[in-house]
Image (cartoon, grey):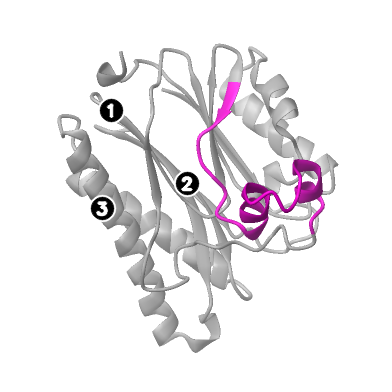
Protein backbone atom coordinates (compact mmCIF):
# COMPACT_ATOMS: atom_id res chain seq x y z
CA UNK A 1 0.00 0.00 0.00
CA UNK A 2 0.99 3.59 -0.50
CA UNK A 3 -0.04 5.66 2.50
CA UNK A 4 0.13 9.23 3.70
CA UNK A 5 -0.93 10.67 7.03
CA UNK A 6 -0.94 14.11 8.58
CA UNK A 7 -2.35 15.30 11.90
CA UNK A 8 -2.36 18.76 13.42
CA UNK A 9 -3.84 20.39 16.52
CA UNK A 10 -5.03 23.32 14.40
CA UNK A 11 -4.83 26.99 15.25
CA UNK A 12 -6.97 27.09 18.40
CA UNK A 13 -6.66 23.84 20.35
CA UNK A 14 -3.66 23.36 22.67
CA UNK A 15 -3.92 19.57 22.56
CA UNK A 16 -4.41 17.28 19.60
CA UNK A 17 -7.08 14.79 20.72
CA UNK A 18 -7.03 12.96 17.38
CA UNK A 19 -5.18 9.68 17.01
CA UNK A 20 -4.48 7.24 14.18
CA UNK A 21 -2.82 3.93 13.40
CA UNK A 22 -1.42 2.08 10.39
CA UNK A 23 -0.78 -1.68 10.53
CA UNK A 24 0.19 -3.56 7.38
CA UNK A 25 0.97 -7.11 8.52
CA UNK A 26 -1.46 -9.72 7.18
CA UNK A 27 -4.74 -7.80 6.94
CA UNK A 28 -3.99 -4.10 6.60
CA UNK A 29 -5.61 -1.87 9.21
CA UNK A 30 -5.96 1.92 9.07
CA UNK A 31 -7.68 3.95 11.81
CA UNK A 32 -8.48 7.56 12.65
CA UNK A 33 -10.16 8.66 15.90
CA UNK A 34 -11.31 12.02 17.25
CA UNK A 35 -11.43 12.21 21.04
CA UNK A 36 -13.86 14.29 23.04
CA UNK A 37 -13.95 15.19 26.70
CA UNK A 38 -12.26 17.44 29.20
CA UNK A 39 -8.62 18.52 29.27
CA UNK A 40 -6.58 15.60 27.90
CA UNK A 41 -9.40 13.09 28.45
CA UNK A 42 -10.39 13.10 24.79
CA UNK A 43 -6.78 12.38 23.93
CA UNK A 44 -6.85 9.39 26.29
CA UNK A 45 -10.11 8.08 24.80
CA UNK A 46 -8.93 8.21 21.18
CA UNK A 47 -5.56 6.64 21.97
CA UNK A 48 -7.21 3.92 24.07
CA UNK A 49 -9.72 3.05 21.33
CA UNK A 50 -7.05 2.91 18.63
CA UNK A 51 -4.87 0.65 20.77
CA UNK A 52 -7.66 -1.73 21.81
CA UNK A 53 -9.04 -2.12 18.29
CA UNK A 54 -5.56 -2.53 16.79
CA UNK A 55 -4.66 -5.25 19.30
CA UNK A 56 -7.90 -7.15 18.80
CA UNK A 57 -7.83 -7.04 15.00
CA UNK A 58 -4.16 -8.03 14.80
CA UNK A 59 -4.80 -10.96 17.16
CA UNK A 60 -7.94 -12.40 15.58
CA UNK A 61 -8.20 -11.22 11.96
CA UNK A 62 -6.73 -13.32 9.16
CA UNK A 63 -6.86 -12.91 5.36
CA UNK A 64 -8.83 -16.13 4.74
CA UNK A 65 -11.79 -15.43 7.02
CA UNK A 66 -15.32 -15.33 5.64
CA UNK A 67 -16.91 -11.87 5.61
CA UNK A 68 -19.36 -12.74 8.43
CA UNK A 69 -16.51 -13.82 10.71
CA UNK A 70 -14.47 -10.73 9.82
CA UNK A 71 -17.39 -8.45 10.65
CA UNK A 72 -17.88 -10.27 13.94
CA UNK A 73 -14.27 -9.59 14.91
CA UNK A 74 -14.66 -5.91 14.12
CA UNK A 75 -17.92 -5.63 16.06
CA UNK A 76 -16.19 -7.18 19.05
CA UNK A 77 -13.25 -4.78 18.63
CA UNK A 78 -15.58 -1.78 18.83
CA UNK A 79 -17.29 -3.24 21.89
CA UNK A 80 -13.99 -3.91 23.67
CA UNK A 81 -12.81 -0.37 23.01
CA UNK A 82 -16.08 1.02 24.36
CA UNK A 83 -15.82 -1.13 27.48
CA UNK A 84 -12.23 -0.06 28.12
CA UNK A 85 -13.15 3.63 27.90
CA UNK A 86 -16.09 3.24 30.30
CA UNK A 87 -13.93 1.30 32.75
CA UNK A 88 -11.37 4.11 32.71
CA UNK A 89 -14.00 6.74 33.50
CA UNK A 90 -15.07 4.74 36.54
CA UNK A 91 -11.49 4.93 37.81
CA UNK A 92 -10.97 8.58 36.82
CA UNK A 93 -14.07 10.66 37.65
CA UNK A 94 -12.50 13.73 36.02
CA UNK A 95 -12.83 11.94 32.68
CA UNK A 96 -16.51 10.99 32.98
CA UNK A 97 -18.11 11.81 29.63
CA UNK A 98 -14.99 11.25 27.56
CA UNK A 99 -15.37 9.38 24.30
CA UNK A 100 -14.16 9.19 20.75
CA UNK A 101 -15.27 8.75 17.18
CA UNK A 102 -13.47 6.05 15.23
CA UNK A 103 -13.36 5.26 11.52
CA UNK A 104 -11.26 2.45 10.08
CA UNK A 105 -10.47 0.36 7.02
CA UNK A 106 -9.60 -3.32 7.33
CA UNK A 107 -8.26 -4.54 3.97
CA UNK A 108 -7.69 -8.28 3.58
CA UNK A 109 -7.07 -10.60 0.66
CA UNK A 110 -10.73 -11.70 0.51
CA UNK A 111 -12.57 -8.57 1.60
CA UNK A 112 -12.38 -4.92 2.63
CA UNK A 113 -14.49 -3.49 5.45
CA UNK A 114 -14.94 0.06 6.68
CA UNK A 115 -15.96 0.36 10.33
CA UNK A 116 -17.37 3.60 11.65
CA UNK A 117 -18.89 5.36 14.65
CA UNK A 118 -19.24 9.12 15.10
CA UNK A 119 -18.66 11.95 12.63
CA UNK A 120 -15.22 11.24 11.29
CA UNK A 121 -15.51 10.05 7.69
CA UNK A 122 -14.41 7.45 5.16
CA UNK A 123 -14.32 8.23 1.44
CA UNK A 124 -13.30 6.20 -1.60
CA UNK A 125 -11.85 7.84 -4.70
CA UNK A 126 -12.68 5.61 -7.68
CA UNK A 127 -12.63 6.54 -11.38
CA UNK A 128 -12.20 10.22 -10.51
CA UNK A 129 -15.33 10.19 -8.33
CA UNK A 130 -15.36 10.71 -4.55
CA UNK A 131 -17.81 8.50 -2.65
CA UNK A 132 -18.59 9.08 1.01
CA UNK A 133 -18.99 5.61 2.52
CA UNK A 134 -19.67 6.48 6.15
CA UNK A 135 -22.72 8.31 7.45
CA UNK A 136 -22.22 11.00 10.09
CA UNK A 137 -23.71 10.02 13.43
CA UNK A 138 -24.69 13.57 14.27
CA UNK A 139 -27.72 15.68 15.10
CA UNK A 140 -27.30 17.70 11.92
CA UNK A 141 -27.24 14.56 9.77
CA UNK A 142 -30.50 13.42 11.35
CA UNK A 143 -32.05 16.83 10.64
CA UNK A 144 -30.89 16.62 7.02
CA UNK A 145 -32.35 13.13 6.56
CA UNK A 146 -35.69 14.25 7.98
CA UNK A 147 -35.74 17.22 5.60
CA UNK A 148 -35.76 19.78 8.39
CA UNK A 149 -32.62 21.52 7.12
CA UNK A 150 -30.78 21.72 3.80
CA UNK A 151 -27.16 20.85 3.06
CA UNK A 152 -26.20 24.54 3.06
CA UNK A 153 -27.98 25.08 6.40
CA UNK A 154 -26.18 22.07 7.85
CA UNK A 155 -22.79 23.64 7.11
CA UNK A 156 -23.60 26.58 9.40
CA UNK A 157 -25.90 24.94 11.93
CA UNK A 158 -25.03 25.97 15.53
CA UNK A 159 -25.39 22.34 16.71
CA UNK A 160 -23.36 20.74 13.92
CA UNK A 161 -20.77 19.44 16.41
CA UNK A 162 -23.27 17.37 18.43
CA UNK A 163 -22.73 13.67 17.71
CA UNK A 164 -25.28 10.95 18.41
CA UNK A 165 -22.97 7.93 18.52
CA UNK A 166 -19.42 7.47 19.78
CA UNK A 167 -17.31 5.08 21.79
CA UNK A 168 -17.75 5.85 25.49
CA UNK A 169 -21.30 7.24 25.21
CA UNK A 170 -22.99 4.23 26.78
CA UNK A 171 -22.99 0.47 27.27
CA UNK A 172 -24.47 -0.25 23.85
CA UNK A 173 -22.28 0.30 20.78
CA UNK A 174 -23.90 0.88 17.38
CA UNK A 175 -21.02 0.91 14.93
CA UNK A 176 -21.56 0.69 11.17
CA UNK A 177 -19.68 -1.88 9.10
CA UNK A 178 -19.57 -1.59 5.31
CA UNK A 179 -18.14 -4.18 2.95
CA UNK A 180 -16.62 -2.20 0.09
CA UNK A 181 -15.17 -2.93 -3.34
CA UNK A 182 -11.65 -1.62 -3.78
CA UNK A 183 -9.72 -1.66 -7.04
CA UNK A 184 -6.10 -1.06 -7.97
CA UNK A 185 -5.11 2.58 -7.34
CA UNK A 186 -8.37 3.50 -5.61
CA UNK A 187 -7.71 5.91 -2.77
CA UNK A 188 -9.36 5.56 0.64
CA UNK A 189 -9.51 8.72 2.74
CA UNK A 190 -10.11 8.51 6.49
CA UNK A 191 -10.40 11.89 8.20
CA UNK A 192 -11.70 13.64 11.28
CA UNK A 193 -14.29 16.41 11.12
CA UNK A 194 -11.58 19.04 11.52
CA UNK A 195 -11.15 18.58 7.77
CA UNK A 196 -14.72 18.12 6.55
CA UNK A 197 -16.17 21.02 8.57
CA UNK A 198 -13.91 23.39 6.65
CA UNK A 199 -13.10 21.73 3.31
CA UNK A 200 -15.97 20.54 1.13
CA UNK A 201 -16.12 17.37 -0.94
CA UNK A 202 -15.40 19.15 -4.21
CA UNK A 203 -12.17 20.59 -2.79
CA UNK A 204 -11.19 17.23 -1.35
CA UNK A 205 -11.77 15.60 -4.74
CA UNK A 206 -9.75 18.25 -6.56
CA UNK A 207 -6.84 17.71 -4.20
CA UNK A 208 -6.93 13.91 -4.41
CA UNK A 209 -6.92 13.96 -8.21
CA UNK A 210 -3.40 15.39 -8.19
CA UNK A 211 -0.68 12.86 -8.92
CA UNK A 212 1.45 13.85 -5.93
CA UNK A 213 2.46 11.10 -3.49
CA UNK A 214 0.03 10.33 -0.67
CA UNK A 215 2.03 12.07 2.13
CA UNK A 216 1.96 15.32 0.14
CA UNK A 217 -1.79 15.04 -0.52
CA UNK A 218 -2.50 14.41 3.17
CA UNK A 219 -0.44 17.43 4.20
CA UNK A 220 -2.16 19.60 1.58
CA UNK A 221 -5.62 18.72 2.87
CA UNK A 222 -4.63 19.49 6.45
CA UNK A 223 -3.11 22.79 5.36
CA UNK A 224 -6.35 23.72 3.58
CA UNK A 225 -8.29 23.25 6.82
CA UNK A 226 -5.75 25.32 8.74
CA UNK A 227 -5.96 28.12 6.18
CA UNK A 228 -9.78 28.15 6.64
CA UNK A 229 -9.38 28.74 10.38
CA UNK A 230 -8.20 25.40 11.77
CA UNK A 231 -10.54 25.67 14.75
CA UNK A 232 -10.38 21.92 15.46
CA UNK A 233 -7.84 19.10 15.40
CA UNK A 234 -7.34 17.73 11.89
CA UNK A 235 -6.25 14.24 10.87
CA UNK A 236 -6.05 12.87 7.33
CA UNK A 237 -5.03 9.29 6.53
CA UNK A 238 -4.82 8.36 2.85
CA UNK A 239 -4.40 4.84 1.43
CA UNK A 240 -3.65 4.08 -2.22
CA UNK A 241 -4.85 0.52 -2.83
CA UNK A 242 -2.26 -1.80 -4.30
CA UNK A 243 -3.99 -5.10 -5.03
CA UNK A 244 -7.79 -5.20 -4.97
CA UNK A 245 -9.99 -7.42 -2.83
CA UNK A 246 -10.43 -10.77 -4.60
CA UNK A 247 -14.05 -11.02 -3.53
CA UNK A 248 -14.77 -7.61 -5.02
CA UNK A 249 -13.82 -8.62 -8.56
Instruction: Tell me residue 13's x, y (percent).
Output: 74, 61
Question: For the residue labelled by badge 3, is the local secondary structure a helix, a strand or a loop?
Answer: helix
Which comes before the other along the chain, label 2 or label 1? Answer: 2
Q: Is residue 23 visible?
A: no
Does the magenta-highlighted stretch encompass residue 87? no
Which comes before the other along the chain, label 2 or label 3? Answer: 3
Which comes before the other along the chain, label 1 or label 3? Answer: 3
Tell me the tag on residue 130.
none
Residue at figure coordinates x 20%, y 30% from the top left: 63
Q: Nearer the viewer, mark 1 or mark 3?
A: 1
Q: Which residues are magenta?
A: 130-157
Question: For the residue labelled by badge 2, is the local secondary structure a helix, a strand or a loop?
Answer: strand
Residue under label 3, please give it: 56
Residue at figure coordinates x 51%, y 68% from the top left: 99
Residue under label 2, please give it: 103
Q: How many marks?
A: 3
Quarter of the figure with residue 48:
bottom left
How far apart are the two marked residues, 1 and 3, measured between alpha carbons?
18 Å
Query: Is 243 placed above or below 105 here?
Result: above
Residue at figure coordinates x 67%, y 49% from the top left: 144
Residue under label 1, please give it: 111
Q: Quadrant of the N terminus?
A: top left
Crowd rating for badge 2 (residues with CA inside 10 Å; few <14, some 14–19, many 20+): many
Instruction: Tell me residue 230's x, y (percent).
Output: 78, 49
How far apart are the two marked residues, 2 and 3, measured between alpha carbons?
15 Å
Which residue occupies the extreme front position in the image? 147
Amino acid sequence: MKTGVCTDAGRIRDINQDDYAIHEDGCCLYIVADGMGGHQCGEIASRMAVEVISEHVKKFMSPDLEISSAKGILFEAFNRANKRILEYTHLEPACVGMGTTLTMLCHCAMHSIIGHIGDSRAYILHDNSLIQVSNDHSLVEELKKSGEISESEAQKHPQRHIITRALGMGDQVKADLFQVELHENDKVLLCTDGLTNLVNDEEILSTLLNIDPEPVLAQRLVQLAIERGGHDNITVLLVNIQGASKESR
